[in-house]
Image (cartoon, grey):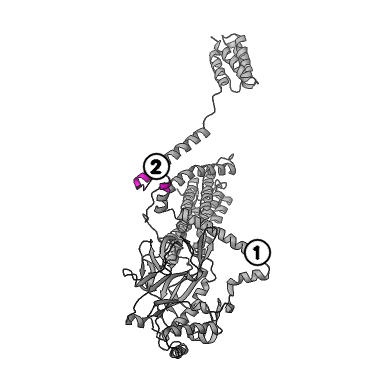
Amino acid sequence: MARPRGTDGSLLASLPWTLVALAVALVPHVPYLPIWITGAAVCCGAWRYLIERRRRPLPSPWLRAALALVSFLGVLFVYSSISGVGPGSALLAIMASLKLLETRQRRDQFVLLFISIFLVMSSLLREQYLWSLPYLVVSVLMIMTAWLRTSATPQESARDSIRAGSRLVMYAAPVAIAMWVFFPRIATPFWSVPIDTSSGVTGLSETMSPGDISSLSRSDAVAFRVTFADAVPPPQERYWRGIVLTQFNGRSWSGSEPLFGGDRGDVQYLGDPIRYRITLEPTRQQWVFALDMPYGWDLPRTQLVQNQQLARIRPIDQRIAYNVISYVQYRSGRSLRDPFRHWYMHVPPGSNPQTAEFARDLRASVRSDKAYIDAVLRKFHDEPYFYTLEPPPLGSQPVDRFLFDTRRGFCEHYASAFAVLMREAGIPARVVLGYQGGEVNPLGNYMIVRQSDAHAWTEVWLDESGWTRIDPTSAIAPERVEVGGGAGIGAVDSVWGLAGPAALWHRLGLTVDAINARWNDWILGYGPDNQNRFMRWLGMDDPGWRQMLLTLVACVVGLLALISLLLTLRYRPPRKDRAATFYRRFVARTKVAPRVGETPANFAARAAGASEIPAAAIDRVTAAYLDARYGSESDAALGRLAAAVSALR
């Protein structure tokens, strides 16, 4: 016998709640999902509601199977895989949407709500933002409410279901907090999943072409946050070293993959150390940023590799925090052997010929390499070179056009041109990408380094001092800075008299960032170290995993017992009615069966003629019962009732 495909409208009251719960679970995934999956979810939800409202038949199994196959192939085509957070979330979302088209009974709604819980939890695998906690509470509350609405009686209102769902969430919250606090944390997870890479991450690249960093200058995204143990170094010493580029093809600079296992290079550390802690945002690269020059760090599987670059064996695909010791005064390298010297002096033959000729002529006119460096810096300072975020295009010979034609550029233009001028003059040079500066947030006493602080500078080899940092951008006169682009908002605010609101927005941004930083440190950063510190605060010195598990079990059992006690007290049966107890005893002694809905007075009149008990005794008991139940002197009447019933023999 064929299964009926029609609907009878029995789910019309609870189906909208299920659709809302599913939509709330899908919201965090929408920015990462292909647009066709979001559209399919909306269409399936609207289609299923119309089917229920108009009592139409559900789609045939063949159509549902075809849609499921096409959706699976679509996810496989978009992601080239079905494993990982991105493909897994996409499959879960599209299958939940298609599940709506075969939802026939309340049991099917329960399956959909169960899938919704998985969708909510999978959104936390990407990132736990500050809004993740309120979203988690609201989404779970909505799912619980929808769950209760599927089995609600017609007399039960939506407000009653919301209250019941809120109580369930409140009862579960202490147990969840106890498990989060006391569950043993380990340095490496039991399992891991590939992180979704469908969306790009703003940051520095391992190659540099004209205009790359200028695009970052318009981004206020946080690159990392820094907390200094002592005084904050001055701005001229805040060079955050990252990627070193050594290869030049005439237009672009590139680096090389880090080579692990070698030594940190010949670095002599001078002066006093600077101790600080960095919280680095995900970059999906191996390079680790630190104040130039890093000396010590506690980030596992991280080394100072060739060219004094700090790199990690695995790419940084999640937020990490690490402590660093750096020396801003140092000497990098004591000798440079000929093969490496030629490597750092290589320029493609025939590239930027005007620059090459100018460099040879200028070098011949001075006595030393240092004098040549000073002459190039004077050229940038004295001649009309401009610093701008919107440089003109440079063409196939970018250095020639920049130095002798446009004379407008960003930091990578000056760093690239300076390095080429050095190499053409026989001075080894390389380009360093990183960040320069940072803004101190007084609300949290830490420094914010944003993507807009991305910077490029040059290192040149001098026999008497090794690799020496030269920042040619600093040679540009301040009056020749052309801001332009998105960075000109402050100027527009000043013209329209909006400096006050702009400052207010800036302070508000610092406040939000301070809250984010605390969220990252206290919640997302609650790892083995923070857990051990919290356990020591509770009086447990260096607890083992067995002690932690026993503590967890004890806390959970205690909380469950407390919650059970509260539920017992809330839903305990009402106290026994003593007046009703005495009256039932009286009725039993009369040996007369009461009738349904019969009043005490009618029963007394009927029992007076059918019972062996005297009518006067029956009237006394009845009068005392009515006084005890409905009179103002209930205690005294209850005593008279008890005495009258006891007198019956």
Residue 57 seen anywhere in this rendered image of the structure:
no
Residue 190: x %, y % from top left: 36, 54
Looking at the image, the residue that sits furthest to the left is 261
The residue to which callout 1 is attached is 500
Which residue is at a point 40% across and 77% down the rendered structure image? 467
> In this view of the protein, which residue sits in the foreground, 385 or 645?
385
The kind of residue on which mark 1 rests is Gly
**Number of the label disc, if any, that sits on residue 631:** none
Residue 28 forms part of the magenta stretch: no
**Which contiguous range is marked in magenta?**
534-554
Which badge, 2 or 1, comes first in the chain's sequence?
1
Outermost right residue: 496
Name the residue at 39% across, 68% down: 310
Looking at the rendered structure, the kind of residue marked 2 is Val
- Mark 2 residue element: helix
- Callout 2–callout 1 Cβ contact below 8 Å: no
Whether 316 is drawn above or below 104: the answer is below
Q: Which is more toward the observer, 431 or 30?
A: 431
Local crowd at mark 2 within 10 Å, few (<14), some, or many (≥20)? Answer: some
Q: Quadrant of residue 77?
A: bottom left
CA gap between label 2 and label 1 equals 55 Å
Give the x, y percent position of residue 580: 57, 21
The quarter of the picture where residue 347 lies is bottom left
Which of the numbered marks, if any, corresponds to residue 553? 2
Q: Is residue 235 above or below residue 541?
A: below
Q: Residue at x 58, y 74 (%)?
A: 485
Q: Is residue 550 magenta?
A: yes
User: Where in the figure is residue 592, as x and y percent of width and height?
Assistant: 56, 15
